[in-house]
């Protein structure tokens, strides 16, 4: 599959789900992002046998000199666009090979991604079969997070960091709130200051891939690169934090994609149950502020169960405005405002290597979380089934180039609830038509 057809690939249906996972949420420490010279915790969420341990081991004695975030050295060490599968770290490909040999990665064929049509599996493959379970065909993999607990507004933003992220982050600071940012690797390369601003505020960082492709259309190795490099740029730029959650672009994933994320990198999926379509505010014929206002009003004044996970983007001023406009109503209607990455397992489990106090304490090298004085980057970036951990009661003193943007990185539309082996794709074509998320910026950038 060529990068062009891959990136021209548009969107997917996700569903309103009825699955409810965690029932209570704890807020995170006020100080969980403080720098300190103590090593990262020895206790990880995953057992020591999980490959992610070895892949992202980091300690005071690792001998690595971490380049300052935003420096040319930092920027040039990462892929500048879609990761080249010929240049993946050997440890990653070894871990993938072992997972395959151990029978942990289902042998699901890739989809072909054709603009404005459903992504298709080869003839004879049933996307609704539990062994495939494609979200595009409205199959929902049990155990993944779609809903918030009752009364909770799960907050998160996709395709971060971009310029409008600055204003969103300032609004969150002013209101003493934190959110989850599903980050795109090349956008981090492009906007290191904004990345650090978000991180230093204490919002949660999660993975949204390196260049926002439709993941089911990729080879195993391409999936490895998309996830691995996004993990690595976040890890190496935050004193060693290793995200625990990811969100597939367009909500497009299946059993194979999910397994690679989980078995090699320890990543778990967070989806959504409502969609503002805010990415299309900037498109002629897209949604409007009034339409988002109406949807938000309906959701916020509607039933409290399941709680809300609303798909939002901080990729345009209009999208940020829509959130800011809705924010007082979230409070007025009695919703608890909780970062999405804290929904499945609580505030102390946002990063894989977080201790049970919710602390990820950077080691000495993490002191370099400030931009170098001349931050010219050389980035030419263009553009579960696992029972929840016991929730930790965390004492809290507070509530707790051209980046890929909304126009190119829209996600999807939620519809009715569907379970494995029971989906109707009647609204799928409708969604394909509705979503104009032709990724022109990404397309151009990949040609560049
Ligand atoms: C990230 O840090 C690891 C050590 O934790 C190092 O081996 C690797 O080279 C770094 N990656 C980049 C792209 O700088
Ligand atoms: C909807 O728009 C009205 C009129 O501008 C405003 O008063 C209200 O706060 C908005 N509600 C939401 C949810 O944005
Ligand atoms: C599929 O789910 C719908 C809604 O839950 C239900 O009404 C319908 O009977 C189910 N169909 C099958 C084939 O299970
Ligand atoms: Zn996205």
Image (cartoon, rainbow, N blue to C red):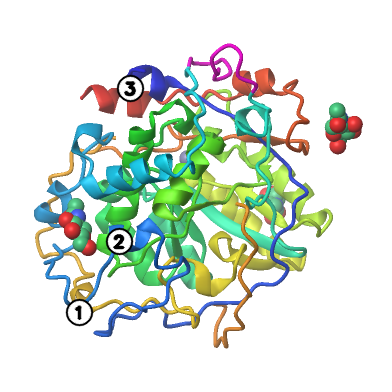
Question: What are the residue bounds of the magenta stretch?
Answer: 114-126
- For the N terminus, the image quarter is top left
Residue picked out by circle 2:
54
Question: Is residue 383 placed above or below 324 in the rendered structure?
Answer: above
Residue picked out by circle 3:
3
* Front residue of 333 and 118: 118
SS majority, magenta: loop
Report which quarter residue 134 is drawn in. top right
**Picture coordinates of residue 64 (x, y %)?**
13, 66
Which badge, 2 or 1, is on the more N-terminal residue? Answer: 2
| Mark 3 vs mark 2: in front | 2
* Front residue of 25 and 298: 25
Q: Left of 196 or right of it: where is 153?
A: right
SS label for mark 1: helix
Estimate the spatial distance between the alpha carbons at disc 2 and disc 1, rounded to whole Å.
Answer: 20 Å
> Residue at point 52% right, 62% down?
179
Question: Is residue 59 placed above or below 105 in the rendered structure?
Answer: below
Which badge, 3 or 1, is on the more N-terminal residue? Answer: 3
User: Within 10 Å of the Cα at label 3, are there few (<14), some (14-19), or many (20+) other Cα atoms?
Assistant: some
> Residue at point 51% right, 42% down?
258
Task: Please say if the residues under marks 2 and 1 sit with CB atoms less than 8 Å apart.
Answer: no
**Picture coordinates of residue 28 (x, y %)?**
52, 77
Q: Which mark is residue 106?
A: none
Residue picked out by circle 1:
364
Question: Is residue 416 placed above or below 308 in the rendered structure?
Answer: above
């Amino acid at each position: 599959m060529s990068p062009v057809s891959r990136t021209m690939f548009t969107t997917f249906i996700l569903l309103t789900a009825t699955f409810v996972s965690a029932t209570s949420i704890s807020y995170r420490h006020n100080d969980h992002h403080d720098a300190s010279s103590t090593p990262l915790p020895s206790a990880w969420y995953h057992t020591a046998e999980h490959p992610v341990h070895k892949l992202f081991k980091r300690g005071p004695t690792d001998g690595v000199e971490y380049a300052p975030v935003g420096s040319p050295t930092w920027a040039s060490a990462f892929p500048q666009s879609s990761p080249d599968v010929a240049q993946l770290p050997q440890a990653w490909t070894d871990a993938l090979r072992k997972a395959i040999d151990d029978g942990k990665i289902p042998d699901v064929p890739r989809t072909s991604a054709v603009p404005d049509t459903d992504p298709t599996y080869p003839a004879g493959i049933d996307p609704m079969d539990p062994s495939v379970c494609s979200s595009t065909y409205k199959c929902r993999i049990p155990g993944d997070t779609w809903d918030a607990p009752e009364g909770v507004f799960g907050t998160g933003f996709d395709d971060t960091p971009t310029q409008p992220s600055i204003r969103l982050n300032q609004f969150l600071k002013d209101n003493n709130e934190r959110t989850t940012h599903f980050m795109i690797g090349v956008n981090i390369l492009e906007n290191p200051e904004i990345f650090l601003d978000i991180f230093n505020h204490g919002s949660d960082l999660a993975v949204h891939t390196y260049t926002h492709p439709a993941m089911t259309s990729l080879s195993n190795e391409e999936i490895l690169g998309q996830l691995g490099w996004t993990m690595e740029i976040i890890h190496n730029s935050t004193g060693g934090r290793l995200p625990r959650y990811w969100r597939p672009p367009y909500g497009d994933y299946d059993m194979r994609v999910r397994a690679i994320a989980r078995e090699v990198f320890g990543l778990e999926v967070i989806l959504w149950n409502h969609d503002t379509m805010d990415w299309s505010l900037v498109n002629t014929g897209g949604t409007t502020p009034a339409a988002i206002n109406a949807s938000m009003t309906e959701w916020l004044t509607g039933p409290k169960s399941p709680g809300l996970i609303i798909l939002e983007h901080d990729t345009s001023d209009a999208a940020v405005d829509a959130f800011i406009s809705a924010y007082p109503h979230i409070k007025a209607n009695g919703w608890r405002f909780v970062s999405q990455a804290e929904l499945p397992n609580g505030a102390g489990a946002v990063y894989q290597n977080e201790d049970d106090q919710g602390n990820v304490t950077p080691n000495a090298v993490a002191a370099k979380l400030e931009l170098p004085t001349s931050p010219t980057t050389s980035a030419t970036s263009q553009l579960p089934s696992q029972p929840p951990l016991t929730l930790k009661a965390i004492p809290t003193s507070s509530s707790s180039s051209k980046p890929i943007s909304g126009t190119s990185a829209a996600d999807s539309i939620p519809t009715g609830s569907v379970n494995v082996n029971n989906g109707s794709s009647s609204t799928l074509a409708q969604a394909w038509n509705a979503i104009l998320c032709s990724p022109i910026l990404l397309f151009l950038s990949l040609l560049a």
